[in-house]
Amino acid sequence: SGGPCPPGHFCEEGSSRAQPCPAGTYSPSWSGTQCLQCPEGFYCTSASTNYTDCPPAPSGPCEAGFYCTGGSTIPNPRHGAVGDICPQGHFCPAGSHSPSPCPPGDVPQNLRGVARALECPAGHFCPPGTRAARQHPCPEGTYG
């Protein structure tokens, strides 16, 4: 006991022990008095009782196909309070803090958990509900 509070922990005034930061938080420096909420686009796993395993920084970016709004404990949240799977008509690259709408005509527009928007290929058109990039070839005498 004694000494500065290690990263990944917080030390309340008058406390004789360093407390590990709870899941969804982190502490980046020595002598921390509080843990910080895991930032948007990242997740912070559960803390360990061993200070060398506790999170001094976010564990990593939110997984592609998901978004993390802050305080997430896993890279692929599905409950909405701290993030969720990317909704239909949107895409979420790794590290997303919110879904980005797919531009009109991109594919796929009706799937959840999309990591990136895909452009409709030349010679095809992609109306809402398109399930595959080459599903709708341009009719004879037209181009796209």
Image: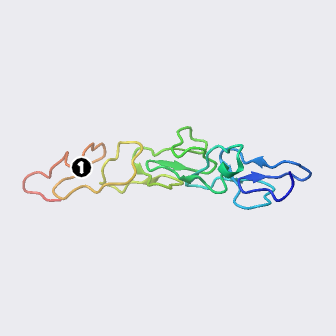
Residue located 19% across and 48% down the image = 134
Q: Amino acid at mark 1?
A: Ala
- Residue sticking out furthest to the top: 79
Find residue 17 and report its horizontal and vertical position in percent: 84, 48
Find residue 91 and report its horizontal and vertical position in percent: 41, 52
Of 14 and 92, the residue lying toward us: 14
- When asked about the image quadrant of residue 87, the answer is top left
Q: Is residue 129 left or right of residue 84?
A: left
Of 17 and 143, the residue lying toward us: 17
In the structure shown, which secondary structural element does the residue marked by tag 1 occupy? Answer: loop
Of 52 and 29, the residue lying toward us: 52
Residue located 80% across and 60% down the image = 31
Residue located 72% across and 57% down the image = 7
- Residue sticking out furthest to the front: 1
- Residue sticking out furthest to the right: 14
What colouring method underlies this structural image? rainbow
The residue where tag 1 is placed is: 133
Find residue 100 and report its horizontal and vertical position in percent: 45, 55
Q: Badge 1: how crowded within 10 Å, few (<14), some, or many (20+)?
A: some
Q: Quadrant of the C terminus?
A: bottom left
Above/below status of 6 relative to 127: below
- Residue sticking out furthest to the left: 141
